[in-house]
Amino acid sequence: MKKILILNALIIAILLSCKKETTIINNPLPDQIYYRDISPDTTFNSVQYYLTFPLGIGEPFPEDTTVTYLLDIDSNFISDYEFSVNHYFYMQTSHDKYYHYTNQVKSLSPTDSIAVISKNSSNALALKEGDIISNNLNYSNAANLLLNLQGVPISYVFSGDYLVIKRCINNTTMLGWIKLKLAQKNGLTIEEFAFNKTNSNSIICGQKY
């Protein structure tokens, strides 16, 4: 009888030990948030001003222009993302000129990406503060922030505050956000950004620690 009791006690101890070990394995690793505030905010535009002649208000000066901004996301003196604002002359009718205005972002490394609206879309996914960023979103190496194509029935406006990014370095997937907004004169304003250095952990838009 004594041997049976000892055996039962050993079995229970082993089961409790296994349960405890499983619980530890299943616990997510703590977040490691890298945050940076761009102070002052960085704004860049492709249009300096609009001409009021000869065909009326709306002619951008200079006429065909692209302005780019490089963002080093992890402060290692290597640019990771390129933002560009662009406008160019499209066509002229007897009454007016038409221009195309575009804002875009692209990753400079094949292992970095940007969240897009859907698998077949090239338009950036726009999120609000408090939205959760996960690895299950659709990602691409480039995305549109603005498509204002005068004379063509195609348009897109980034309507949120947070751009979603994903970085894959040394088998570590890091999710993050860049807070930005469209600016006047076909511009962009970059305000702040953060990413979670813990592998595959989600991050909340606006999360700083």
Image (cartoon, rainbow, N blue to C red):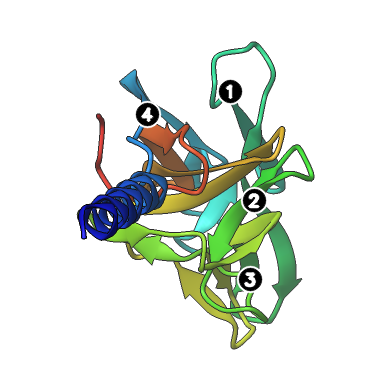
Answer with mark 2 or mark 1, whichever residue precedes in sequence: 1
Q: Nearer the viewer, mark 1 or mark 4?
A: 4
Q: Nearer the viewer, mark 2 or mark 1?
A: 2
Give amino acid for label 1: Asp
User: How far apart are labels 3 and 2 at the CA level?
Assistant: 32 Å
Give amino acid for label 4: Gln
Answer with mark 3 or mark 4, whichever residue precedes in sequence: 4
Q: Secondary structure at mark 1?
A: loop
Give the residue displayed 58% in from the left and 54% down from the top: 114
- Residue beneath label 1, please? 72
Answer with mark 3 or mark 2, whichever residue precedes in sequence: 3
Measured as percent of width and height from the top left, residue 48 is found at 51, 36
Measured as percent of width and height from the top left, residue 189 is found at 39, 37
Q: Secondary structure at mark 3?
A: strand
On the rendered image, what quadrant is the N terminus found in? bottom left
Give the residue displayed 48% in from the left and 63% down from the top: 56
- Residue beneath label 3, please? 98
- Residue beneath label 4, please? 32
**Depth order, front residue of 201/156:** 201
Q: Secondary structure at mark 4?
A: loop
User: How far apart are labels 1 and 3 at the CA level?
Assistant: 35 Å
As drawn, 11 above or below 100: above
As drawn, 91 above or below 1: below
Q: Is residue 145 left or right of residue 16?
A: right
As drawn, 116 above or below 66: below
Residue with the most extreme right position = 110
- Residue beneath label 2, please? 113
For the residues labelled 4 and 2, say whether their Cβ atoms are less than 8 Å apart: no
